[in-house]
Image (cartoon, coloured by chain):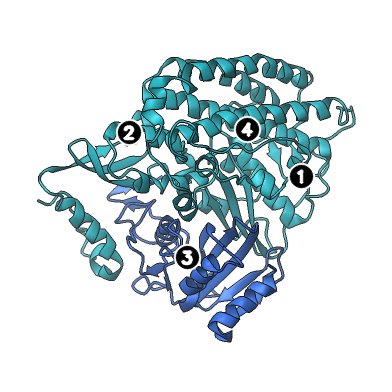
Amino acid sequence: MSFDDIKLLLTDKFGEAVVLGEERTGMQPALLIAPDRIADVCLELRNNPKTYFDFLSCLTGMDYGVDDGRFGVVYHLASIPYHLQLTLKVSRLNDRNEDNLPSFPSVSGVYRTADWHEREAYDLVGIFFEGHPDLRRILLPDDWEGYPLRKDYQAAEYYKGIKID
Amino acid sequence: MKRHCLVPRNDGKKNRLETTSKYNEALQSYHKKIAEASVEDMVLNMGPQHPSTHGVLRLELITDGEIVKEVIPHVGYLHRCFEKHAESLTYQQTIPFTDRLDYLASMNNSHAWVMGVEKMLGIDKDIPKRVEYIRVLVCELNRIASHLIAIGTYGIDIGAFTPFLWCFRDREHVMGMLEWASGSRMLYNYIWVGGLFYDLPVGFEERCREFVEYFKPKMVELNQLLTDNQIFINRTANVGVLPLDVAINCGCSGPVLRGSGLKYDLRRIDNYSVYPELEFDVPIGTGAMGTTGDCWDRYKVRVDEIDQSLRMVEQCLDRLQKELKRTPDFDPRAKLPRKITPKAQDYYARCEGAKGELGFYFVADGRTEVPFRAKARGPSFNNLSVLPEISKGVMIADLIAIIGSIDFVLGEVDR
């Protein structure tokens, strides 16, 4: 199944509004999905017998830079029976206030592997996932301040009164 | 009883945990769960220094007597900030950092990183065949070394000491050869974008052939000692059964996925580098001693993969000694680009590491030599996340067997 067929399949099922656009400049084309529908889209792609994207290879939390003001998540799906790969992207504008994290629906109900990947994206980039069963920090301590992979992150000098070298 | 408490800061400002409670519901419910564990249940900490966790992993167990009711893994003790580092170093400078992900099979890591960068630069077709064969040769040798550690330490987890010594004795030969080629023992920095650090030393092929001849009977001995040992089978068969659908859904890859019976190997699926020119089989778990996907199956897949890697090493040596001979004017760094500036794009490169699918997601902005974002997808991270799933209701001693059979490296979990 080609990239265009997958796009057609999604727009047939969910309507035109679900695909916000596409990126074809790189070697791996990507579909830009409406942020609120990403979990439905993943469920459909996993269960549809024409695609069977049953393997979530990678989930990346993205900070597109201070000027851009956008946060996003990139999903790399793989279909084991059909040997296909697909990239999905969602993104949202955000004002970088830590009391108001960018938030996307969790796909951990579709792919259980997303559980830890989303925890990592929350931990390092500061993205909130609605409906995640256990969204705690995973690599850093629970009381760490700030999200280190954000582009405006200032490296902490002290942690609990201990100087960080 | 409250066992954990978060100390408020004393500098007047409010703690982040107090101000943004919306984002801390999960943390609070976790603390509640641990605090409210019933009196009969025990909350046990396994690690961070437990020998079977090969380093720095803490498992929080809620147990009823000797039965494990729940496992909560805590990772992050080794967090080396690979992704943060990669955002401030050039593509070439990051290669030594990729070596430290899966430090037991670091050739595979640099191979994955380098392949991704070469694909983005569009020079992946120009790499000389001799370079490609040397890369595959050292990767497969490194895979053998990694699987030998997995098998040897698995023996020790179960309580057998001799296989550990035998495996480390044989691994030492591989380490010696790779050290001869690259100059360092574990973190090689040997595969570079566009070539290699150096050609193989003179006499490497002959010595490698000697090793293969020496090593083959040793594997037969090891199988007699450990694989077919009735005590070992009793401890591992039907323990920690991982059904195939759970394995796929949890993102397992490598020997853990193949142990559950799926023939899925990226060396065959993606056909990268010169793997399509080599003959080898993909071993899978068959449930010969118990259920498909149990600890014994995962262990056996690794033993069989060593045999397949030996086959590949022999084929590489054949080509390197006959068609792609060393010539005095051969320069493994000839294709090295002077400046590595890929055009603005994002690319996900994946390859089959010793533990499973190792992926790198690059975002290049097209202006600098530094990646805008580099995400590493370590196979051990996903393989470890299946642990709470398959260790419900087992005995504590079986939990050790399950952890060993997953064979994760914490450098790849925390990155």
Report the disc number at residue A55.
Answer: none
Q: What's the distance in space between the residues labelled 3 and 4, CA to CA?
A: 34 Å
Q: Secondary structure at mark 2?
A: helix
Report the disc number at residue B398.
Answer: 2
Q: Earlier in the sequence, mark 1 or mark 2?
A: 1
> Can marks 3 and 4 be said to lie on one chain?
no
**Which residue, given by chain and number where applicable, does mark 3 sit on?**
A152
Q: Residue at x 29, y 56 (%)?
A: A143
Q: Amino acid at mark 2?
A: Asp
The color chain A is rendered in: blue
Q: Is any part of residue B55 visible from this angle?
A: no
Q: Residues within 10 Å of mark 1 (few under 14, many from 20)?
A: many
**Which residue, given by chain and number where applicable, does mark 1 sit on?**
B194
Q: What's the distance in space between the residues labelled 1 and 2, CA to CA?
A: 46 Å
The correct choice, above or below, for B66 with respect to A40 in the image is above
Q: What's the distance in space between the residues labelled 2 and 3, CA to CA?
A: 46 Å
Q: Quadrant of residue A2?
A: bottom right
Output the chain of dot 1: B
Report the disc number at residue B188.
Answer: 4
Question: Which one of the lettered chains is coloured cyan?
Answer: B
